[in-house]
Amino acid sequence: MNFLKLKKMSSKLPLPPYYAVIFTSKLKKKSLAYEEMAHKMLKLAQKQKGFLGMESAREEIGITVSYWKDLESIKNWKENTAHQLAQKLGKNEWYAAYRVRIAKVERDYEFF
Amino acid sequence: MNFLKLKKMSSKLPLPPYYAVIFTSKLKKKSLAYEEMAHKMLKLAQKQKGFLGMESAREEIGITVSYWKDLESIKNWKENTAHQLAQKLGKNEWYAAYRVRIAKVERDYEFF
């Protein structure tokens, strides 16, 4: 299972406005169980209504930015039963610290 | 010069609302010149009016999220002369692709 393979730049997002969830975290330590859960959550998030994309990288800290159509979609994802279990495991087992920021993307521009 | 040493979770940000600039990028290849410029730009950004913090990680893609008091601060930083030069070098030399998203942080919560 290689979660890294799925980490690429999201493209084909709609024009703003849409929402970003900026999730920054420090792991107690890397583990296969964590990697597997992260992969599982990505696959599950992709099936949610209003999911637009996800980008992720980890060095000293991990940054995962997921993109959503609206606040309702974010709320539904937060309350998803399997995701709730993952969040609980995250708090209890894997994360030394994390922060979640919910932000409205107002503008974007790119260079390719 | 180790840019990684400076990559840690921003703390002590003010309560929302404030702004986030989500910068995602793919490098053509890693280089010392790029690392040095990234370090220099972080140091310079920290001196700008309205700068609140910066978080960064890179694997397949790089994600740098910088936090700012308001849109005016972001505009001033974008137009900063030294930063303009770095942006030009970035486009010409280092980045295969990048995307910039400007987002208003409406809510945050944390676990420590």
Image (tube, coloured by chain):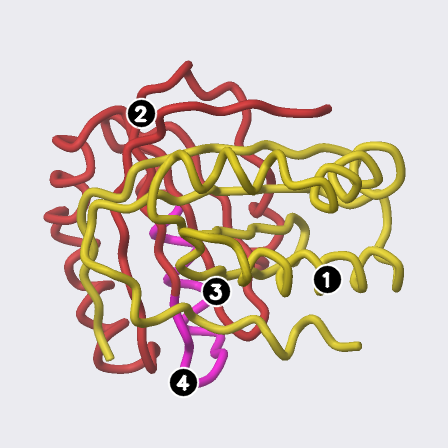
Chain colours: A red, B yellow
Residue matched to label 3: A62
Q: Of tags 4 and 1, which is closer to the observer?
A: 1
In this rendered view, identify the residue nearer to me: A39 or B107: B107
* Magenta-span inclusion, residue B35: no
Left or right: A94, with B98 as reference point: left
Q: Which residues are magenta?
A: A25-42
Q: Of tags 2 and 1, which is closer to the observer?
A: 1
Amino acid tagged 3: Gly
What's the chain of the residue with tag 4?
A: A
For the residue labelled by badge 1, is the local secondary structure a helix, a strand or a loop?
Answer: helix
Q: Residue at x 27, y 72 (%)?
A: A90
What's the chain of the residue with tag 1?
A: B
Residue matched to label 4: A28
Q: Position of residue A105 (x, y in %)?
A: 35, 30
Residue matched to label 1: B40
Q: CA distance from mark 4 to mark 2?
A: 32 Å
For the residue labelled by badge 2, is the local secondary structure a helix, a strand or a loop?
Answer: strand
- Disc 3 or 2, which lies upstream in sequence? 2
Figure label count: 4
Badges 2 and 1: C-beta atoms under 8 Å apart?
A: no
Amino acid tagged 1: Lys
Q: Residue at x 66, y 34 (%)?
A: B98
Left or right: A77, with A8 as reference point: left
Q: Residue at x 30, y 64 (%)?
A: B13
For the residue labelled by badge 3, is the local secondary structure a helix, a strand or a loop?
Answer: strand
- Residue extending furthest toward the top: A15
Q: CA distance from mark 3 to mark 4?
A: 12 Å
For the residue labelled by badge 4, is the local secondary structure a helix, a strand or a loop?
Answer: loop
Amino acid tagged 2: Tyr
Q: Position of residue B112 (x, y in %)?
A: 24, 80
Q: Which mark is residue A18?
A: 2
Q: Which mark is residue B59?
A: none
